């Protein structure tokens, strides 16, 4: 029986490592292909010039600025709302259990909604009902709606995972609930909060369908939050599907998008680690 158990354990370990290796291999294959096809077109001029010839020539400066503006609006709206909702769900669950269960079911349902549905919703609410039109604000707020379920659920689980002894110790020291949350719970939950931010940022940066219906399709430099703007993901889609001869710039744009995603994720993880380190100190 012991020998059989050891064989089963080794087989399970091998299967797990094989699955992890396969995922890593696919990721390296995708990144390698994008880098191989796009690195030759990448240059300082590509990042600082405007598109020409429907995107076949020139650079991506207006698209890059629009993408960063969309991300700023999305995270500026999703982070405070998501953090506050997660705190409410985790810290008052024993008093509002039915309400919390209803909210969690709604968040799980929202996380599964296709992006095209969010695009139609954002177009109806932000573009027409609120009168924002095809703009950075409409696209960013739509992305915030898409990122909220990920941010809220990850942050809530991180707060729930904090040992209850920390809450008891804070109460014994006479700390208020607000101080306990700020100085004890949030630093301890920082890695989990970072996971939610990374997932939300990843979905926001990679989104295409929802932005076509909300932020627009133009390639000019946005001058205000109410101007239309094209995101990097939309630019990649347009060059690869609708512009003959645009493949080289599509791959270079995709490489910039991947690099931007990795940079933002690294900043989020680094900030969470500093926050957690300050909480331990």
Image: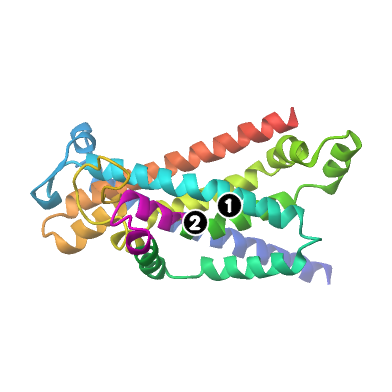
Of residues 118 and 267, the one nearer the viewer is 118
Q: Which residue appears farthest toward the right when viewing the image?
A: 172
Q: Is residue 7 above or below residue 262?
A: below
Of residues 135 and 71, the one nearer the viewer is 135
Residue located beneath label 1 in the image: 82
Q: Residue at x 85, y 37 (%)?
A: 170
Residue 262, picture quadrant: top left
Q: Is residue 152 left or right of residue 234?
A: right
Q: Quadrant of the N terminus?
A: bottom right
Residue located beneath label 2 in the image: 147
Q: Is residue 279 above or below residue 225?
A: above
Residue numbers of the magenta segment: 126-144
Q: Residue at x 77, y 71 (%)?
A: 4
Q: Is residue 113 left or right of residue 173?
A: left
Residue 216, picture quadrant: bottom left
C-beta proximity under 8 Å, tags 2 and 1: yes
Q: Secondary structure at mark 1?
A: helix
């Amino acid at each position: 029986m012991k020998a059989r158990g050891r064989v089963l354990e080794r087989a399970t370990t091998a299967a797990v490592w094989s699955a992890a290796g396969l995922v890593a291999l696919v990721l390296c294959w995708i990144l390698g292909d994008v880098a191989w096809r796009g690195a030759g077109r990448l240059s300082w001029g590509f990042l600082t010039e405007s598109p020409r010839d429907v995107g076949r020539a020139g650079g991506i400066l207006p698209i890059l600025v629009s993408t960063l503006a969309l991300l700023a609006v999305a995270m500026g709206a999703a982070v405070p709302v998501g953090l506050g909702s997660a705190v409410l769900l985790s810290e008052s669950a024993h008093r509002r259990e039915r309400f919390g269960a209803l909210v969690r079911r709604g968040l799980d349902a929202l996380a599964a909604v296709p992006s095209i549905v969010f695009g139609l919703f954002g177009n109806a609410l932000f573009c027409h009902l609120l009168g924002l039109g095809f703009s950075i604000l409409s696209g960013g707020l739509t992305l915030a709606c898409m990122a909220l379920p990920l941010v809220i659920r990850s942050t809530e689980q991180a707060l729930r995972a904090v040992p209850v002894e920390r809450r008891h110790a804070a109460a014994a020291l006479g700390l208020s609930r607000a101080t306990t949350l700020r100085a004890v719970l949030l630093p301890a939950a920082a890695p989990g909060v970072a996971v939610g931010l990374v997932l939300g940022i990843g979905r926001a940066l990679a989104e295409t369908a929802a932005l076509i219906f909300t932020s627009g399709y133009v390639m000019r430099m946005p001058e205000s939050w109410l101007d239309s703007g094209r995101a990097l993901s939309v630019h990649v889609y347009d060059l690869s599907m609708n512009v003959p001869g645009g493949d080289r710039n599509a791959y270079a744009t995709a490489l910039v998008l991947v690099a931007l995603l990795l940079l933002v994720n690294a900043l989020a993880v680094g900030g969470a680690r500093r926050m957690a380190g300050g909480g331990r100190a």
